[in-house]
Image: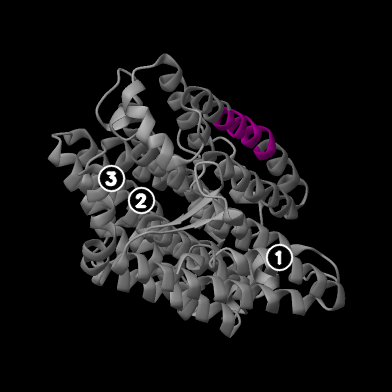
């Protein structure tokens, strides 16, 4: 059964190579390969999640070399949960029509889907790695593929990719430097082995410096405020399918790394207090990101830029949940990882359908879209209501657990900001709803528009249904998956 640990990764890795070769023959064959690969990865992830929830964690020693000398892959409820999200969103994006998702029809040999599969491979590797340096390798794999995908957005996309490359390199360097400090101090890179060594030297300046470097590096990868400066342009100027991947799963790799390293590797050195205010920093920078991101989203007139700044705010919720370091707050953060992945991928993919049909990106020109695209805009409405936090959608319950976790530790500021931020989110989505569903069409390009293809509608509807189901059945997900994760990490 230990081989199950790496099964979610292998279809994506080999699929990237096969998709490249298939694309040399016919571009459509590359997309078919991507669909098959992500489908297999999703099946393996779901089977792995059910297995580890029922029977406990699994591990796989790469090349037969046991840890701490060899590289270890670990599949536990946390990694399996995130792996399932990565594979699910990846499958929906590669199933989306290529011209709506990527603003182009790739010619033979264009490495579009190989880059997508390489991005998903890197993300999946981050989730499964049990070795700090190996995690760095996968961080770089997904980052390199991201640079190429963002640059598909034309001149502005190329500039955004360059900015992300520069800042992403800084984040990777900080993370690697922190890992180096830990290696020099503990003599190991294996997460489980290091976790046994660190409690005895938790107050060491080297360990504290390593913690600061790693948190800063991963915070930059996660685009946690104020380290988010690369995100708005990268999401705004990249094609909608790329933006969906970035917002839904790519930035969550940094969040996963923070959760795994802070709670599993540092453990009591983080949650027990060391004089290094990492917990407070994550909490209050997260709160600042919620407010600033929501305020800047209100001021946008471009739909993709609005969604990009909204992502800054939504990542703030996750940062707050990690910073509070209570079981309920961590449940809220993990549930928001899932709910935001569903919501934001749906919103960006709807934006792609609108742009494909009308060429419109400016919100004031959206007047009447709900009358000509009722199914597509209906899915948009469900995702938007979940972003606001309207019950019984998924977004309501993730915010509910965050508020509950804040009340547990008497941090009423967090509770107030989460509630007020929902009102700010309601402001910019109400403006959209008025344009889309109330105002009559003002332009011929809107009056003449029709629903996008059935693949667009099907993808959006799947996401809308999942948003509703995660909300309605959140209790099952929390009790069987998220609560055991939070209890094991935080007691």
Task: Indicate left or right for 105 with 304 as reference.
Answer: right
Helix, strand or loop for disc 1: helix
Q: Residues within 10 Å of mark 1 (few under 14, many from 20)?
A: many
The numbered mark at residue 16 is: 1
Mark 3 / mark 2, whichever is N-terminal: 2
**Residue pushed farthest bottom?**
454
**Does 204 appear above or below 193?**
above
Q: Does label 1 or label 3 sit earlier along the sequence?
A: 1
Residue 351 position, x and y percent, is: 56, 64
Q: Which residue is mark 3?
A: 489
Q: Is residue 204 visible?
A: yes
Query: Does residue 362 sit above or below 131 in this rendering?
Result: below
| Side (left or right) of 14 relative to 385 | right
Q: Determine the secondary structure under disc 2.
A: helix
Q: Would residue 246 appear left or right of 164 to someone viewing this image?
A: left
Q: Are marks 1 and 3 in contact (CB under 8 Å)?
A: no
Residue placed under numbered mark 2 in the picture:
425
Q: Real-space Cα distance between discs 1 and 3?
A: 34 Å
In the rendered image, residue 138, in percent from the top left (x then y), is placed at 60, 48
The C terminus lies in quadrant: top left
Please state which of the two labelled residues, at mark 1 or mark 3, is closer to the viewer: 3
Residue 195 disc label: none
The residue that appears at 48% across and 63% down in the rendered structure is: 5
Region of the chain picked out in magenta, as a range: 164-176
**Considering depth in this image, is 428 or 90 the residue closer to the camera?**
90
């Amino acid at each position: 059964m230990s081989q199950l640990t790496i099964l979610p990764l292998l279809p994506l890795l080999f699929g990237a190579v096969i998709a490249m070769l298939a694309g040399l023959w016919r571009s459509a064959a590359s997309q078919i390969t991507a669909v098959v690969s992500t489908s297999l990865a999703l099946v393996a992830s779901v089977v792995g999640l059910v297995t580890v929830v029922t029977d406990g964690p699994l591990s796989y020693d790469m090349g037969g070399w046991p840890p701490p000398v060899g590289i270890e892959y670990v599949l536990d409820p946390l990694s399996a949960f995130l792996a399932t999200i990565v594979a699910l969103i990846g499958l929906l994006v590669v199933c989306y029509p290529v011209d709506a998702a990527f603003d182009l029809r790739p010619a033979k040999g264009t490495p579009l889907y190989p880059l997508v599969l390489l991005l998903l491979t890197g993300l999946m590797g981050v989730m499964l790695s049990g070795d700090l340096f190996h995690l760095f390798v996968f961080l770089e794999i997904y980052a390199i593929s991201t640079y190429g995908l963002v640059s598909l957005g034309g001149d502005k996309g190329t500039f955004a990719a360059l900015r992300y490359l520069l800042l992403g390199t800084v984040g990777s360097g900080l993370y690697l430097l922190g890992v180096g400090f830990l290696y020099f101090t503990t003599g190991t890179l294996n997460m489980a082995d290091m976790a046994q060594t660190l409690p005895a030297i938790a107050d060491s300046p080297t360990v504290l410096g390593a913690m600061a470097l790693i948190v800063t590096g991963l915070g930059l990868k996660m685009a946690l405020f104020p380290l988010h400066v690369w995100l708005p342009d990268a999401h705004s100027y990249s094609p909608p399918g790329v933006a969906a991947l970035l917002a839904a799963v790519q930035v969550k790799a940094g969040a996963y790394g923070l959760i795994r390293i802070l709670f599993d590797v540092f453990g009591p050195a983080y949650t027990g207090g060391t004089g290094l205010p990492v917990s407070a920093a994550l909490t209050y920078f997260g709160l600042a990101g919620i407010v600033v991101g929501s305020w800047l989203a209100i001021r946008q007139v471009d739909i993709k830029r609005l969604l990009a700044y909204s992502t800054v705010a939504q990542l703030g919720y996750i940062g707050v949940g990690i910073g509070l370091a209570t079981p309920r707050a961590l449940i809220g953060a993990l549930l928001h990882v899932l709910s935001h992945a569903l919501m934001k991928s749906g919103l960006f993919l709807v934006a792609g359908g609108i742009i494909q049909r009308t060429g419109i990106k400016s919100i004031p020109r959206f007047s009447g879209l709900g009358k000509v695209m009722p199914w597509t805009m209906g899915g948009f409405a469900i995702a938007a209501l979940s972003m606001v936090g309207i019950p019984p959608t998924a977004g309501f319950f993730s915010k509910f657990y965050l508020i509950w976790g804040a009340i547990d530790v008497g941090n009423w500021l967090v509770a107030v900001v989460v509630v007020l931020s929902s009102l700010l989110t309601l402001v910019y989505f109400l403006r959209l709803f008025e344009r889309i569903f109330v105002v009559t069409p003002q332009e011929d390009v809107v009056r003449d528009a029709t629903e996008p293809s059935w693949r667009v509608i099907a993808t959006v509807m799947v996401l809308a249904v999942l948003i509703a189901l995660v909300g309605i059945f959140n209790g099952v997900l929390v009790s069987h998956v998220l609560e055991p994760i939070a209890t094991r990490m935080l007691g």
